[in-house]
Image: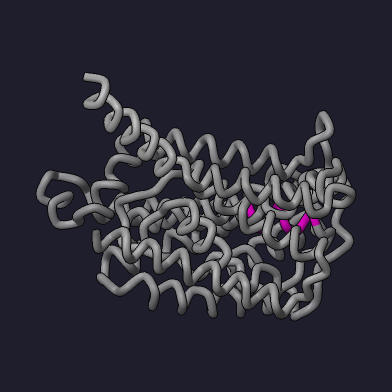
Amino acid sequence: MEAAAKPKGNSRLKRFVGDNKILFIFIALFIVMSAVRPDAFFTYTNLTNLLKQIAVNAILAVGMTVVMTTGSFDLSVGSVVGVAGVVVALSAKAGVPGIAALLIGVLVGAAFGCVNGLAIAAFKIPSFIVTLAMMQAARGLSYMFCEGFPVTGFPKSYLFIGQGYFLGVPVPVYIMAAVAVLVAVLMRQTKFGRYVYFIGGNEEAAALSGINVFKTRVLSHTLCGLLAGVAGIVLTFRVGSAMPAAGEGFEMDAIAAAVIGGCSLSGGVSRISGTVLGALILGLISNGMNLLGVTTYPQMVIKGAIIFVAVLLDTRANKK
């Protein structure tokens, strides 16, 4: 009886490790960095800066996770970050009341996402093509709105959103946590979330079972765009200005965080907590390389290798 029970315990342990491997990877990286550079890494200033820096990518990655779960992509989120930031900064500079200015930025992001979703769902155009076109359009609009110059001169009170602290924790971290919790609840506890997983698993079966695939796709892309707007607001007030080029390349970091966190490229499988951990891992690696004196270009190569390995592992997992 004891011999028969042993494999069962081992299989449970293997399953636990497999289900939480991203967490273990993060803990291992954290311990390594703490040991290698304890004087620079494991400090209040560095850790709060790390959290503040990954907040924008984590917010974007959460939205990206939703659309990737349906089997789609959104390559426009980086450009939407830029245009939303410019619109919010211009609105604030023009004297639009605080809440209204922020709402405008969020709605701008949601509008871009909604257009993406409508084009993908109504015309059956691949998400790669639609969002690639939107990426160019949104970037062009951000340059047009500010005539190619950074937007500054808005009220200093807005800077609290990106630079403020509450109880010793950066405000962007609270925003990131709120976004992650709300979307996790949405994905796990609502019909919309279940429909997203069903569509990603098998769109035809989902449609035959009565799920409104069109509506779900539009809503998922709208949510992704909305969160890109939120990320644009946080980034703008973190750096203290709105730049038309802001957000360039952010879409790849968002996809990488989602894939590292266990989101399948083919759809149907994801975990919001894993995505946040994926963003933390990417931020931890970048932070560690900065502390070790690794320059920008090698960092780009290493990030590219990480994305490649994550995609390769996801592809092999799907084949099994």
- What residue appears at the point 65 percent right and 75 percent down from the top-left corner? 300
Q: Is residue 296 shown to the viewer in this render?
A: yes
311 falls in the magenta region: no
Relative to 167, is 231 above or below? below
- Residue depicted at x 53% and y 35%: 181
Q: Nearer the viewer, residue 299 or 152?
A: 299
Looking at the picture, does residue 215 appear above or below residue 130?
A: above
**Residue at the top extreme?**
1
Q: In the image, what residue occupies the spot 54% across and 79% down?
A: 136
Q: Is residue 29 above or below residue 142?
A: above
Residue 250 on image: x %, y %? 60, 67
Q: Looking at the rendering, in which quadrant would you find the N terminus?
A: top left
Q: Is residue 234 magenta?
A: yes
Q: Nearer the viewer, residue 225 or 186?
A: 186
User: Can you see residue 159?
Assistant: no
Q: Quadrant of the C terminus?
A: bottom left
| Drawn side of residue 59 relative to residue 73, left or right | right
Q: Nearer the viewer, residue 177 or 19?
A: 19
Q: Residue drawn at (66%, 73%), measured in percent from left and top?
A: 142
Count of number-bearing discs: 0
* Residue 80 image position (x, y, % from top left): 58, 65
Q: Which of 291/181 is in front?
A: 291
Q: Does the magenta stretch mainly form a helix, a strand or a loop?
A: helix
* Magenta-colored span: 231-238
**Residue 81, relative to residue 96: is it above or below?**
below
- From the viewer's perspective, tell me whether residue 128 is left or right of residue 246: left
